[in-house]
Image: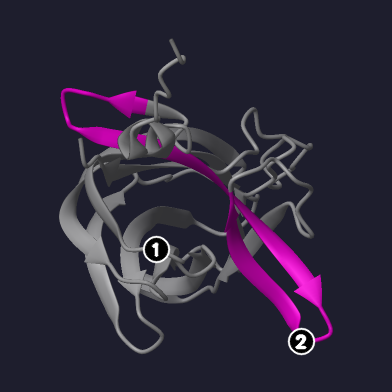
Amino acid sequence: MPVPIVYRKSTEAALASYNFTDIAEGTGVVTYYGATTNDSVGEEYVLLSQTLYSYSLSTATTITNGTGSYTKFGDYDFDLSTFSLPKTIKGTCLISFGWGLGAGGNPDAYIIWKVRKYDGTTETDLGSVQTEGIKANATNAEELLSFTLTETNFAKGDILRVTCEVWGKNTGGVDYVATFAHSPKAQSVNTGGGNLTNSVLTILIPYKLDL
């Protein structure tokens, strides 16, 4: 009698592309790392699925003196390569990273993270989260943020975008710098407030499972 051929279900093959699954939420979670690349065109912020070396290990944003109310001083878009197949994102997003303030001025800052769909023209927000403020200079913070993403369909050619906005105010007489790290290889990053314990920007994105 011939041995029967057992074909693997398509959903089983799909699960292999996720770092882990959350059956309660019905999602498969993919881990991405923030980094930058550099070529003849210039530096670009990207999302990686592997822990490769980043061109730059961190990004520093100057918060200028004389700013009495919170102002957005930095806006950085980390983009994944375009989707080759339709996807649906839903569930809980986690972001882990380290950042800090250098000495000087009278600093007060926070960071907003946004997860977006970008179709080449229009950005659609899926969710956002704001850190607690840092109110002392020469200070570091290690963050783990959790927030819910609205269920959103991504078509072939769409881009997953994670945006970092740096907000601050400063009336201390001199400029100061807010620095956040994005080193997938966990290399040493000094913010001016000392070396960060966590220099890896890690983003966990939940995809809807079609089971």
Residue receiving disc 1: 85
42 in magenta: yes
Residue receiving disc 2: 41
Furthest residue in direction top, as rendered: 1
Three-letter amino acid code of the residue under disc 2: Val
Q: Which residues are magenta?
A: 21-48
User: Residue 51 placed where, x, y %?
Assistant: 69, 40
Local secondary structure at mark 1:
loop
Three-letter amino acid code of the residue under disc 1: Leu
Tell me which numbered mark, 2 or 1, is placed earlier along the sequence. Answer: 2
Q: Quadrant of residue 145?
A: top left
Q: In the image, what residue occupies the spot 51% across and 62% down?
A: 80
Q: Does 48 sit above or below residue 69? A: above
Q: Quadrant of residue 1?
A: top left
Q: In the image, what residue occupies the spot 47% across and 73% down?
A: 73
User: Residue 201 placed where, x, y %?
Assistant: 56, 43
Chief secondary structure of the magenta portion: strand
